């Protein structure tokens, strides 16, 4: 029996250590496809009348469709910041957009998702529209990303009213730290080009035997005239959605060719009503109280009505064994960091508060108790939050529309709050009457939220603006450069790169071909090899120790036991 117990112990040790090795070898690739301005009702899994998204339908059949998912902000930069940090805007400091004239960005003491998972050997790439700062150390290759292709900002407000295009406003197109072309032009940011750059990055990571994180950020739906050089007379929204669907299908096919990636398709905020016929569909979440009983305006992007932040999320991870699942739990993009950390068994930094929860597997019963706060763009104070299935407003407002860009955007305050039961009133039209106990409960939640969100590490954000922060590749050519003129230093290349970030490696012919045996890549492979050999050594030593113990306690015991002595003597003679 003792002999068997030792063998069992050795077997268990082998199993645990091999499981550890297996886990380190089978880290999943992670792909986040984010879309600005995509509405809850724009896709067939959410709207039976949509027929232009067959590839996204396939994703829904393979994975989980979340029906109560919310972006971390109702406009681009705050939503991006919440996604990458796993923290509310009240903590990470990002309340409004970063445009070409902004000198700041996502505060430098915030830790991003790629920085968190980098110690596990992940290579991280960002393709598309970056909206978290472009000067100095705010650039994506200084925030944990090893590769960047896309535009680093959008034109400031008021510029894009008519005749709006990347060409007209001279927005630069970057690959890593180098300007490929300025103005970018719609060809450099086309769906096909963004797909190509994404697949190229994934293939390079595979050739290096590195797990990867890819974020593909699509802004074409929110800014169609900027990225597509078209308006509602020359473009049709259904055609844009169909192109997005084709891109999604091709990206998932490439990512899943040799592995089972964690693939997330999500919108970063609701439809932009100012786009008129090129605006998305947020129905049934229409915020009708604002339209009928207040001062009107849009109730989608830029507002905290459901249409501004309740958006699609589809998650596919075939290892989770979930397919065609509908998840009704209350979730948010602040949950992405916590979800990835849970899957990879990564410890999050302990010097700050994280606001998210793991979304996998689906938590079906959290709608009765979870509280999610929504961001105000003018103050850190909490004005709006979800408590279970109820939406609580202490302040409301509308936003500019297609036909009226001068809608008053000042907040209208409510005390007691407006409360809508989203189980029975998805259009947010009929506030429910509150008892004194309920009024006091919501006041307590608001006060506790304000107190908690300002506790611990909160990040100050640089809000200053200057035209000198607008990137110009060459003033002597009126900020016009092309690929063959891209040898000049970029505005950020003189900034010292943070220690441990390998983002200065270029993967393109702009800076020369990639050498997969470069010193940095060799170091990655050698560290992995040393780690594996160390684990094998531990296994061997434990096995030897266990075998020796078995011999000591069993076989030598037989030799030294008196009743067995004659038997041994007889056998020897």
Image (cartoon, grey):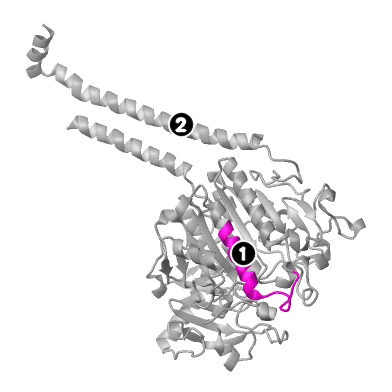
Residue shown at 67% from the left, 77% from the top? 278
Of all residues, the one furthest to the bottom in this rendering is 293
The quarter in which the N terminus is drawn is top left
Do we see residue 63 in this rendering? no
Q: Is residue 98 left or right of residue 366?
A: right
Q: Is residue 238 magenta?
A: yes
Q: Nearer the viewer, residue 205 or 91?
A: 205
Most common SS among magenta residues:
helix
Q: Is residue 158 magenta?
A: no
Of all residues, the one furthest to the right in this rendering is 476
Query: Residue 175 at x, y = what percent?
Result: 73, 52
Q: Decide: few, some or many residues near mark 1? Use Cα within 10 Å; few <14, some 14-19, many ≥20.
A: many
Query: Residue 53 at x, y = what percent?
Result: 55, 69
Q: Is residue 481 above or below residue 451?
A: above
Residue shown at 71% from the left, 58% from the top? 150
Query: Residue 446 at x, y = what percent?
Result: 50, 77
Q: Decide: few, some or many residues near mark 2? Use Cα within 10 Å; few <14, some 14-19, many ≥20.
A: few
For residue 80, which numbered disc appears in the image? 1
Query: Residue 431 at x, y = what percent?
Result: 48, 89
Element under disc 2: helix
Q: How many marks?
A: 2
For the record, the magenta segment spans: 229-250
Residue holding disc 2: 534
Mark 1 to mark 2: distance in Å?
40 Å
Pointer 1 or 2: first along the chain? 1
Q: Is residue 190 above or below residue 433?
A: above
For residue 91, which numbered disc appears in the image? none
Q: Quadrant of residue 156?
A: bottom right
Q: Are marks 1 and 2 in contact (CB under 8 Å)?
A: no
Q: Nearer the viewer, residue 119 or 343?
A: 343
Element under disc 1: helix
Do we see residue 267 in this rendering? yes
């Amino acid at each position: 029996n003792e002999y068997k117990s030792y063998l069992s112990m050795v077997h268990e040790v082998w199993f645990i250590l091999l499981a550890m090795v297996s886990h380190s070898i089978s880290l999943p690739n992670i792909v986040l496809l984010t879309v600005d301005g995509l509405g809850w009702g724009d896709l067939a899994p959410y709207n039976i009348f949509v027929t232009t998204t067959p590839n996204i339908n396939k994703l829904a059949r393979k994975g989980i469709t979340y029906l109560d998912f919310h972006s971390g902000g109702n406009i681009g930069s705050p939503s991006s910041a919440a996604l990458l940090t796993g923290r509310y805007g009240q903590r990470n400091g990002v309340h409004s957009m970063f445009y070409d004239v902004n000198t700041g960005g996502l505060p430098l003491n915030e830790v991003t998702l790629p920085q968190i998972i980098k110690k596990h050997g992940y290579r991280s790439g960002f393709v598309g529209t970056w909206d978290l700062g472009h000067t100095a150390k705010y650039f994506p290759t200084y925030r944990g990303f090893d590769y960047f292709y896309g535009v680093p900002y959008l034109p400031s407000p008021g510029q894009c009213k008519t005749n709006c295009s990347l060409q007209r406003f001279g927005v630069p197109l970057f690959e890593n730290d180098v300007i490929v072309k300025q103005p970018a032009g719609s060809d450099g940011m086309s769906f096909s080009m963004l797909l190509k750059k994404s697949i190229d990055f994934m293939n390079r990571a595979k050739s290096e035997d590195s797990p990867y994180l890819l974020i593909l950020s699509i802004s074409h739906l929110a800014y169609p005239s900027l990225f597509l050089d078209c308006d509602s007379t020359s473009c049709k929204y259904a055609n844009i959605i169909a192109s997005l669907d084709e891109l999604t299908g091709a990206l998932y096919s490439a990512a899943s060719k040799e592995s089972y990636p964690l693939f997330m398709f999500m919108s970063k905020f609701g439809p932009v009503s100012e786009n008129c016929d090129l605006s998305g569909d947020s129905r049934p979440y229409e915020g009708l109280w604002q339209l009928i009983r207040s001062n009107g305006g849009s109730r989608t992007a830029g507002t905290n009505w459901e249409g501004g932040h309740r958006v699609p999320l589809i998650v596919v991870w075939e290892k989770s064994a979930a397919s065609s699942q509908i998840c009704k739990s209350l979730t948010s993009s602040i949950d992405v960091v916590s979800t990835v950390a849970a899957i990879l068994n990564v410890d999050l930094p302990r010097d700050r508060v994280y606001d998210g929860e793991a979304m996998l597997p689906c938590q079906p019963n959290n709608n009765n108790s979870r509280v999610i706060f929504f961001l105000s763009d003018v103050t850190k104070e909490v004005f709006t939050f979800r408590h279970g299935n109820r939406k609580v407003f202490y302040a409301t407002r509308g936003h500019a529309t297609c036909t009226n860009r001068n809608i008053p955007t000042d907040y209208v305050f409510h005390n007691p709050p407006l409360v809508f039961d989203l189980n029975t009133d998805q259009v947010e039209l009929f506030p429910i009457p509150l008892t004194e106990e309920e009024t006091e409960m919501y006041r307590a939640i608001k006060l506790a939220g304000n107190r908690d969100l300002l506790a611990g590490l909160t990040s100050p954000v640089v809000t200053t603006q200057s035209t000198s922060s607008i990137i110009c590749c060459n003033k002597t050519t009126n900020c016009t450069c092309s690929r063959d003129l891209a040898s000049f230093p970029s505005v950020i290349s003189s900034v010292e790169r943070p220690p441990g970030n390998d983002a200065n490696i270029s993967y393109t012919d702009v800076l020369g071909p990639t050498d997969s045996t470069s010193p940095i890549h060799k170091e990655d492979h050698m560290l992995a090899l040393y780690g594996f050999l160390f684990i094998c050594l531990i296994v061997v030593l434990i096995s030897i120790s266990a075998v020796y113990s078995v011999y000591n306690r069993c076989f030598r015991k037989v030799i030294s036991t008196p009743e067995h002595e004659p038997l041994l003597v007889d056998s020897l003679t």
